[in-house]
Image (cartoon, rainbow, N blue to C red):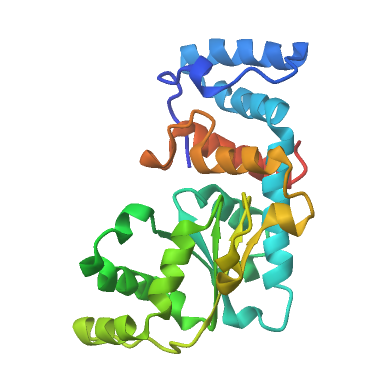
Amino acid sequence: MELKNLGSVNPRRTLSVPRSTPPAADDLLKRYEVEALRGSLAARDLWKQCFKEDHREEGRVAVDFVRYLHDKYFTSSRRADTCLVFLRHGAAPLEELFRATLPQSATGQMIGIVLQNTMFRKVAEQPMIVKRIHEAGILHFNKVVLVDTGFKGSVSKKVIDLLRYKRLLKFTEEKYGIHIPNIDREFGIELLCLRDKGVSDADYNLLGYNFVVGRPEDQIFEDAAWLVDEGVTEIGKAAPWTLDRILLTEALIEIARGGD
C-alpha cells in the first residue's frame, strides 16, 4: 500500500481533533495540515501519530481482537480444519492486521472475500454467491468462522443460511459443474462489537468480542468497530481503500508491534 500523493487530502476532514485536545496532539494536527497541503510524504507519519493520539484505545481494542482470534482458532489441534473468513470491505483492516503481525503459519487458513448485503437481494443470484465462496477455497474447511466488525452479524448470517441450504448447494454443483465437499460443516461468527444478543444468535454460534471480555456496554468497542469499518473520514466501504483507511491499517499494525 504505497502512498505517493497526499496533496488532495483534506486534513480537517481526515482527522478529528482529539477528545482532550492535548497540546502535543494539537501540534501534530497543525503539522499534518502543513505537510498534507505540500503533498509531502511526511504527512503519512504525522497522520498516524495523530490517529494514535486520538484513537489509541480503539486501536488497542482492534489489535486485541485479532490476537484473540489467533489464540482461539490457531493454537488448537483443530486449526487445520478451521478457516477465518474476513468480510470485506469492512473487516479488511483486521485481515491486513492479522497477516502483518501474527505467525505466517496461521495465514493459510485466512481468506478475505467481498460479501455485502446488496448481493443477497435476488434469489436468482444465490448460486453465483455460493460459487464465489467455493472458488475462494472456503468450502474446503470443516469449520468456517466469519469475521466482521459489527453490529448484528446480518451479512454473516445470510452467508451461513445459504451454505446450510443443501438443495441450493446441490443445484449450484449441477449448474456450474463443481464439487462442494463436506456440506455438513460447522459455522461461527466473530464480531468486533455485538450490540445486543439475539435469540437466534446461538444458532449461528455468534460471538461479540465486547461480550467475550465482559464489557458488553462499553462504547469503546462500538467506536473501534466504526473506525475499522468506515475509516476516520467515514467515506467507508464505497471506496474500500481510501487513504485514511490505508493509514489507519498501518497505524494499527504499528500499535500491534509496540509502536504506540
Residue at horizontal 56 percent and vertical 73 percent from the top = 203
Residue 13's x, y, as percent? 49, 19
> In front: 28, or 225?
225
Residue at horizontal 44 percent and vertical 21 percent from the top = 9
Quadrant for residue 167, please give it.
bottom left
20 sits to left or right of 190: right
Q: How many numbered marks appear?
A: 0
Q: In which quadrant of the rendered image does the C terminus lie? A: top right
Residue 86's x, y, as percent? 51, 60
174 sits to left or right of 226: left
Vertical placement of 126 versus 212: above or below? below
Q: Is residue 112 visible?
A: no
181 sits to left or right of 196: left
Residue 122's x, y, as percent? 24, 62
Residue at horizontal 62 percent and vertical 23 percent from the top = 46
Quadrant for residue 26, please give it.
top right
Vertical placement of 34 versus 110: above or below? above
Vertical placement of 170 versus 137: above or below? below
Q: Is residue 161 visible?
A: yes
Residue at horizontal 67 percent and vertical 63 percent from the top = 69
Q: Residue furthest front?
A: 199
> In front: 77, or 172?
172
